[in-house]
Image (cartoon, helix red, strand yellow):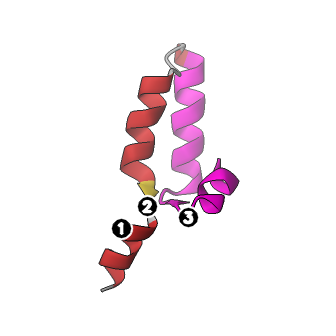
Amino acid sequence: MDIFLGLNGARLDAEPQAVITFIYGHLEAGTFRKPVLEDWLRTYVASPEHRAEASA
């Protein structure tokens, strides 16, 4: 996922353990679905525009 985001100018802004906990938690609970992943990514993906604003 990190490679895909990087190729598209974005980056994952989450600690590795938080990513693992999110993925495995939802896989084990049977709740790993596209809408859940989309919501999580909206929270933890920093787009190039967001990073530029944060550094200004």
Q: CA distance from mark 2 to mark 3?
A: 9 Å
Q: Position of residue 56 (x, y in %)?
A: 30, 86
Residue type at the position of mark 2: Ala
Q: How would you rate the neighbour count of disc 1 (Cα within 10 Å): few for under 14, some for 14-19, many for 20 or more?
A: few
First in sequence: mark 2 vs mark 3: 3
Q: Position of residue 9 (x, y in %)?
A: 55, 64
Q: How would you rate the neighbour count of disc 2 (Cα within 10 Å): few for under 14, some for 14-19, many for 20 or more?
A: some
Mark 1, residue position = 50
First in sequence: mark 1 vs mark 3: 3
Q: CA distance from mark 1 to mark 2?
A: 6 Å
Q: CA distance from mark 1 to mark 3?
A: 11 Å
Label at residue 46: 2
Asked if the residues shown at circle 1 and circle 2 are in contact, with their CB atoms under 8 angstroms apart, the answer is yes
Nearer-the-camera pick, 5 or 19 = 5
- Secondary structure type for disc 3: loop
Please give the range of residues in magenta: 1-28
Magenta span: helix, strand or loop, mainly?
A: helix
Mark 3, residue position = 9
Q: Is residue 4 left or right of residue 40?
A: right
